[in-house]
Image: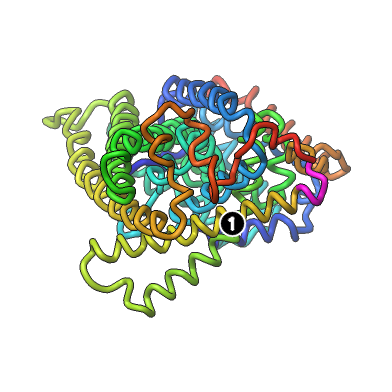
């Protein structure tokens, strides 16, 4: 519920064009924040983007439901890095026919918002509780926001285009049916993603804790782009000027 | 989804039709024009004509029918949701809402099915910020490497009983499995970075310049673009 599968030509132009414009602006901003990052960091972002796509390829039941991993990726990369990954993943998905090309911007915004909120929520709780529940809580917050945005976009798209209903039927009745189907899936998605994030956080805390943002990063003011970039085992994107190598 | 992508990726590199030989830039512009025409066409006649033209492109590119149906038919489920919510008792509205996404997804299938990904991403990476442009190449490349690994992981989880028991346990174990992929992705990024340095990485992945190498096959793309423009001029004002 944090990724729009809406194809081209169904949403009002102002909605997808506005979404695309905002997403491109945010992408430019995110790239500017992360301007000093090394190719190694970009390769790490690529690996996590590939993981998101791989997770999305595994259906978990009806309605093409699948994981997105937006929360964990947001925590691992920080808001700026995760937004770039969200944009790239949305573009590749659109080229595969999963969501229209015009919806790339809205998809990046929905996925990126989930990732960024998860990152912020993780930072708030990481110093107080262990990494696994912190990652799960961050994911809950991220999925809640991403799902709400997803519902808002679809509802808005349907609401603005809804024509006259059949006699005796209120125009909003069909939207009510949609909400009745979508809201339980949204809640289910929050539970599933947070449990997976819990397992992921528990594993990383045991095996490679350097990949998780450290306490001072989580609590402090380290820029979103820095994320887990510093410290042993957290190599991607480490030093200034690394990008000038070779 | 990934099986379809892998097949499309293979066909894009091995196909021998004029569309496969044409430059990526020309095809990208043609696909963009089809998309714009499909989304903004005011009347059904123009939409049907553009749809028919797109089918001609797809059929002449010799992509397997099963693959085309799988990839292009994907939006139908979500289109049906919108069609159901907006049905006004006429047949024109569902037809319009059905043809638009189908036409654009067919155009996307034709584009990615006839263009190898380095050629397709190269022009896009030049207009995107550096990290996003490079991310396109690296994410796509990482996907296939991770995919084989994730398949082995799910198999191992199943064999060791990781997919039994209560849902809470299964999902947490699946998260642990994904954690191994995160660690693998991190280690892979270190190796990839070293390889990039050894190969003289200059700070940006731009892909090759084949995308802008025009050939005689591009005349077919130009012809298709001319037909599309003609259809637009002729049918724009018609219902």
Side (left or right) of A208 relative to A193: right
> Residue sitting at 31 percent across and 30 percent down?
A158
| x and y, in percent, of residue B225 in the image | 72, 33
Find the residue positioned furthest to the left.
Answer: A168
Dot 1 lies on which element? helix
Few, some or many residues within 10 Å of mark 1 (<14, 14–19, 20+):
some
> Residue sitting at 27 percent across and 73 percent down?
B164
Q: Which residues make up the magenta segment?
A: B197-201
Q: Does the magenta stretch include residue B2?
A: no
Find the residue positioned furthest to the bottom.
Answer: B159
Residue B239 visible, this angle: no
Q: Does the magenta stretch include residue B198?
A: yes
Residue A36 visible, this angle: yes
Side (left or right) of B66 relative to A126: right
| x and y, in percent, of residue B204 in the image | 73, 37
Find the residue positioned furthest to the right.
Answer: B216
Quick one: B206 or B191, which is closer to the camera? Answer: B191
State which chain disc 1 sits on: B
Q: Mark 1 points at which residue?
A: B187
| x and y, in percent, of residue B205 in the image | 73, 40
What is the basis of the colouring in this image?
rainbow
Quick one: B81 or B201, which is closer to the camera? Answer: B201
């Amino acid at each position: 519920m944090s990724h729009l599968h809406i194809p081209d030509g169904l949403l009002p132009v102002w909605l997808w064009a506005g979404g695309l414009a905002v997403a491109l602006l945010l992408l430019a901003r995110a790239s500017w924040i992360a301007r000093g990052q090394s190719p190694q960091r970009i390769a790490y972002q690529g690996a996590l983007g590939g993981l998101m796509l791989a997770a999305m390829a595994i259906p978990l039941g009806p309605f093409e439901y699948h994981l997105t991993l937006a929360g964990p990726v947001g925590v691992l990369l920080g808001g700026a890095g995760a937004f770039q990954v969200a944009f790239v993943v949305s573009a590749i998905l659109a080229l595969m026919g999963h969501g229209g090309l015009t919806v790339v911007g809205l998809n990046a915004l929905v996925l990126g918002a989930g990732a960024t909120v998860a990152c912020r929520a993780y930072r708030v709780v990481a110093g107080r509780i262990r990494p696994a529940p912190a990652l799960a809580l961050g994911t809950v917050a991220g999925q809640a926001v991403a799902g709400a945005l997803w519902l808002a976009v679809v509802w808005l798209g349907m609401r603005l285009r809804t024509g006259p209903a059949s006699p005796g039927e209120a125009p909003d009745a069909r939207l009510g049916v949609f909400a009745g189907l979508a809201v339980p899936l949204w809640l289910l998605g929050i539970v599933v993603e947070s449990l997976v994030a819990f397992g992921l956080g528990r594993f990383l805390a045991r095996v490679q804790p350097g990949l998780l943002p450290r306490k001072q990063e989580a609590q402090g003011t380290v820029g979103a782009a820095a994320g887990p970039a510093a410290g042993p085992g957290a190599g991607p994107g480490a030093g200034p000027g690394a990008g000038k190598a070779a | 989804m990934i099986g379809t992508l892998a097949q499309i990726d293979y066909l894009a590199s091995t196909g021998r039709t004029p569309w496969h030989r044409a430059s990526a830039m020309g095809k990208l512009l043609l696909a963009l024009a089809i998309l714009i025409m499909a989304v903004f066409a005011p009347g059904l006649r123009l939409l049907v004509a553009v749809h028919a033209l797109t089918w001609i492109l797809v059929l002449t590119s010799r992509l397997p029918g099963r693959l085309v149906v799988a990839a292009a038919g994907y939006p139908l489920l979500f289109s049906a949701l919108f069609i159901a919510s907006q049905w006004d008792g006429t047949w024109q509205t569902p037809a319009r809402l059905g043809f638009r996404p189908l036409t654009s997804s067919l155009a996307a299938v034709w584009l990615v099915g006839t263009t190898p990904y380095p050629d397709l991403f190269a022009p896009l990476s030049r207009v995107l910020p550096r990290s996003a442009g490079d991310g396109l190449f690296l994410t796509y490349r990482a996907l296939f490497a991770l995919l084989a690994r994730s398949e082995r992981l799910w198999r191992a989880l199943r064999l060791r009983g990781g997919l039994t028991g209560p849902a809470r346990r299964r999902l947490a174990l699946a998260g642990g499995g994904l954690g191994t992929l995160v660690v693998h992705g991190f280690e892979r990024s270190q190796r990839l970075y070293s390889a990039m340095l050894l190969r003289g990485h200059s700070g940006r992945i731009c892909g090759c310049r084949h995308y802008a190498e025009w050939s005689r096959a591009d005349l077919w793309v130009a012809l298709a673009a001319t037909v599309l423009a003609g259809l637009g001029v002729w049918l724009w004002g018609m219902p």
